[in-house]
Amino acid sequence: MTWMQSKRIAPRTARRGIWMLLVAVCLIGCHAQVIDLPPDPDPAVQQELMSRWNAVAKDVTVPFPGSMGTVDFLWKSYNQFPHPTFKGGSAEAYQGFADILVAFYGRDDNFAFLANNHLFRIALRYAVSSGQNTSWTFEQLTDDFSSNDWASISMATRQKLAEFATRIHMSP
């Protein structure tokens, strides 16, 4: 091996080592995130959660973009959380969903139910037919919808969500 060849191998080996280290750190970080997710609640709690959500969402519909029809926000199956992205993704869908979220937290003892059952940080999934899941948490949705104006959510609704976000952050 010539002197020039050994000079080329050293940086390549160092880059490969750094790359492997980054991959290992990413895998460890991803693994830690999966471990930190709370398990799904038991089926009775799931049913109660969906029932409470549906009691608030039952009369809310929004136009589905590009059609004459409307969509609702009823939570019919636990792995089909009614996120507005899957309800047409329109400004009306996001506003309607945010209004439901505010009403859901504020109705009866729903907020206490969520806190007592540690439901603010559970995965709320929308499973697509290919078997892949998209998921959120109540905490994440509340934070996102209260602090971003990308979804055209009214200021009044965002302020109410910000108040709930503060309470959620203080919950166990």
Image (cartoon, grey):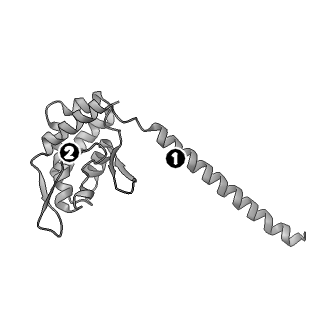
Structural crowding at the residue carrying mark 2, measured as other residues with C-alpha within 10 Å and reported as few (<14), some (14–19) or many (≥20) = many
- Residue designated by label 2: 101
Answer with left or right where residue 19 lies relative to residue 50: right
Q: Earlier in the sequence, mark 2 or mark 1?
A: 1
x, y percent for residue 26: 56, 50
x, y percent for residue 133: 38, 51
- Taking depth in this image into account, of 146 and 48 the one nearest to the observer is 48
x, y percent for residue 56: 13, 42
In terms of secondary structure, where does tag 2 sit? helix
Q: Residue, x 36% and y 36% (percent of image)?
A: 40
Q: Residue, x 12% and y 54% (percent of image)?
A: 61
Q: Residue, x 18% and y 50% (percent of image)?
A: 73
- Taking depth in this image into account, of 79 and 146 the one nearest to the observer is 79
Q: Is 15 placed above or below 55 here?
A: below
Quarter of the figure that contains the N terminus: bottom right
In terms of secondary structure, where does tag 1 sit? helix
What amino acid is labelled 2 in the image?
Leu
- Residue designated by label 1: 30
Q: What residue occupies the far left of the structure in this picture?
A: 59
What amino acid is labelled 1 in the image?
Cys
Q: Is 48 placed above or below 159 here?
A: above
Answer with left or right where residue 12 lies relative to residue 125: right
